[in-house]
Every structure is written in C-alpha cells, then in structure tokens.
C-alpha cells in the first residue's frame, strides 16, 4: 500500500518525466533548451585549479618555522595517530 509520501513522490516523478518528454519531443524546443543551458554555463566563471588558493598550495608540505599555530597543529596531528596506536596496542 502506498503511503502519502510515496504517492506524492511517484506522482511528482511521473509528472516531471512527462513534462520533460513533452518539452524535448519538439526539435525547436530541444535547441532552445540546449542554448539556454549553454548560456547559463557560459556565465559561470571558470576556476582554474592552478590559481585556486595559491597561498595554501605554497604552504602545503613546507610550513614556515615561525608559524606557531601551524607547527603546533602539525605536532598535535602527528601525536594523535601514535596515541591511537598505543591505545589499541594496550
């Protein structure tokens, strides 16, 4: 027996598929939708992965010796795994 949520979800899915089929059945509608999707993605800025957060990339694996917060975090992180191993061993 369908519950009310399942019946709503089934009806919503069927209506969405039917509407999409109706829109995509005509060739001019397909082209228009395709152009709108392309225009939308043309306006989305491309993020070059090489330029994304360059400061962090320069710092990874090479922390500054006087950066107390970062060095402290690294030392605590390395001790976590040792402490975990020792607790499991005992």
Image: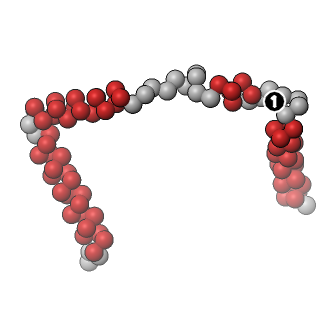
Residue that appears at 25% across and 70% down = 7
Task: Say which quadrant the C terminus sits in.
Answer: bottom right
Q: Position of residue 42 (x, y in %)?
A: 34, 26
Residue 15 on image: x %, y %? 18, 57
State the quadrant of the N terminus. bottom left
* Residue depicted at x 83% and y 48%: 81
When asked about the image quadrant of residue 25, the answer is: top left
Give x and y (percent) for residue 73. 82, 43
- Where, by quadrant of the figure, is residue 23 drawn? top left
Q: Quadrant of residue 52?
A: top right
**48 and 22: which one is in front?**
48
Question: In the image, is residue 54 above or below residue 29?
Answer: above
Q: Residue at x 81, y 30 (%)?
A: 63
Residue 63, visible in the rendered structure: yes
The residue that disc 1 covers is 63
Q: Secondary structure at mark 1?
A: loop
- Asked if residue 85 can be seen in this view, the reply is no
Q: Residues within 10 Å of mark 1 (few under 14, many from 20)?
A: few
Camera-nearest residue between 58 and 89: 58
Q: How is the image coloured?
A: secondary structure
Horizontal arrangement in the rendering, residue 68 relative to residue 5 (left or right): right
Q: In the image, is residue 79 above or below residue 50?
A: below
């Amino acid at each position: 027996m369908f519950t009310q949520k399942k019946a709503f979800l089934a009806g919503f899915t069927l209506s969405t598929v039917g509407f999409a089929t109706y829109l995509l059945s005509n060739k001019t509608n397909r082209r228009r939708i395709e152009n709108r999707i392309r225009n939308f993605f043309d306006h989305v800025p491309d993020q070059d992965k090489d330029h994304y957060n360059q400061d962090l990339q320069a710092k990874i694996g090479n922390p500054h010796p006087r950066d107390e917060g970062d060095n402290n975090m690294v030392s605590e992180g390395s001790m976590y795994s040792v402490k975990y191993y020792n607790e499991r061993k005992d």
